[in-house]
Amino acid sequence: PLDYGFLYGYGLFETMRAYSGHIFRLEAHLTRLRRAARSLGMNLDGIPDLKKALYETIGANRLISARIRLTLSGGQGGPVPDITTCLEPTVFITAREYVPYPDSMYGEGFKAIVSAIRRNTQSPVSGLKSLSYLDNLLARRKAKLAGANEAIMLNEQGFVAEGSTSNIFLVSGNALSTPGEDSGILPGVTRGVVLELARSAGIEAAEKKVALDELMAADEVFCTNSLIEIMPVTGIGGKKVGSGLPGAVTQTLAAAYKRLVEWTGHKAFY
């Protein structure tokens, strides 16, 4: 009960997906976690081998296809808020069977709203997968009450930042773009994979400031995270995106992502 993750949201987490018993882009997740932990002043000396612990958790639950959450909190601290009193982080791992969205959802696409809750580009928390997740939860609640699947969050300058649990991409013509890290986003692992795939496929891809008007006028929009992979967004605020159906670039990248997952799992297995 005195853990600062519980009391003050002082901590981090990573959500990962395992395919055929292999955790996709595990090193990227762990690198991001360690970098963020150092930025928060957490002492990682003495914590367990996280890679080994993650695979042991999958094995203990007898999982092949899994969603995994790794939580790293500051640990127990003093009664007066002071993170320098947290000497030993708490590590907590859970894994459960991954149940994907039905294919029909990928065919229909997500419906989104634009949230009134803003990202703060000046906050160090905006670029971290922090346990301080209340803004995301409140935005997601509004989306659910509005009958939508996702909430798109702007930053304090009025530019598009990210979804409540995802990164946002848009396609205009043949050009792909996504809000840059200076927009107050979490640089998602799946986001990085999509940028790699786009460039490999010869699709022009840019990280930049994205105005809301530009997003609303896009031919295609999709969102990404490690669990849903690449999900088309076919409506925002009650208005259709493009034709109102998943677009060609979105489908090309989604297929390429699935091929990469299969190839990576096959390589790891053998």
Image (cartoon, helix red, strand yellow):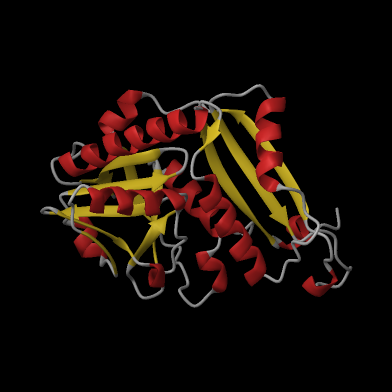
- Which residue is depicted at the point 21% across and 63% down? 213
- Which residue is depicted at the point 72% across and 48% down? 49
141 vs 223, nearest the viewer: 223
Q: Residue furthest bottom?
A: 122
Based on the displayed image, in which of its 4 quarters is residue 10 positioned?
Answer: bottom right
- Which residue is depicted at the point 54% across and 41% down? 16
Give left or right: position of 69 versus 82: left
- Let me know if residue 127 appears in the view: yes
Say if 166 sits above or below 210 in the image: above
Say if 36 sits above or below 49 in the image: below
Task: Point out residue 94 in the picture as x, y percentages from the top left corner.
Answer: 68, 37
142 vs 181, nearest the viewer: 181
Q: Residue furthest right?
A: 79
Give left or right: position of 266 versus 4: left
- Let me know if residue 133 appears in the view: no
Q: Residue furthest top?
A: 62
Q: Residue furthest left?
A: 173
- Which residue is depicted at the point 31% across and 31% down? 106
Task: Point out residue 136 in the picture as x, y percentages from the top left corner.
Answer: 52, 55
